[in-house]
Image (spheres, rainbow, N blue to C red):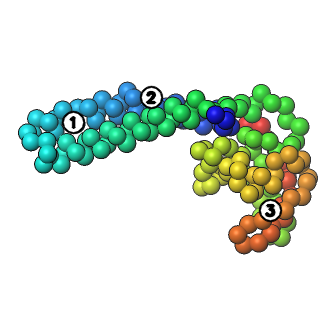
Amino acid sequence: MSMFPMTIQGADALREELVYLKQTRRPEIVQSIAEAREHGDLKENAEYHAAREEQGFCEGRIQEIEGKLGNAQIIDITKIPNNNKVIFGVTVTILNIDTDEEVTYQIVGDDEADIKNNRISVNSPIARALIGKSVDSEVEVTTPGGKVEFEIISVEHR
């Protein structure tokens, strides 16, 4: 199986969710199932069926997180020397050459991407165009609205 890149922050967030699901959520669901069983006939017991369904979702998410962490290549960007090149995990500030609009993105793994928090997937068109380029380089990105040119202003390892 291939390894998937992930930042330390992304791995920590998944580990926290896993602990919550195993130590808090799972026991709550087991308690809900026990309470629903006390209500009698399980065939027509909506609370019981809802709790069992929730249990299935919880167990599925636990397996999913364990699988992701098992196949993750966790990269600590702070331990890599900053040579002003865009690589996985860096925070890069780019300038839209046409509009003079500056935007800052962190390049992260697919599961960590969150455009509202300026975290873009390493597999996104913008990140793919930026990877390997240096500060002051100009890159052209094909977007749904057409081609857009950016200049790389800064690259930070944080």
Q: Quadrant location of residue 2? A: top right
Marks 3 and 2, the one that precedes in the sequence: 2
| Quadrant in the picture for the N terminus | top right
Residue 141 — which label? 3
Could you say whether the residue bearing mark 3 is in a helix, strand or loop? Answer: strand
Marks 3 and 2, how far apart at CA = 40 Å
**Furthest residue to the bottom?**
145
Q: Is residue 58 left or right of residue 105?
A: left
Residue 82: x and y in percent read 85, 35
Could you say whether the residue bearing mark 2 is in a helix, strand or loop? Answer: helix
Residue 18: x and y in percent read 46, 31
- For the point 75% across and 52% down, which residue is it? 127
Could you say whether the residue bearing mark 1 is in a helix, strand or loop? Answer: helix
**Furthest residue to the front?**
1
Residue 103 can be seen in this image = no
List the residue tagged with mark 2.
19
Residue toward you, 21 or 54? 54
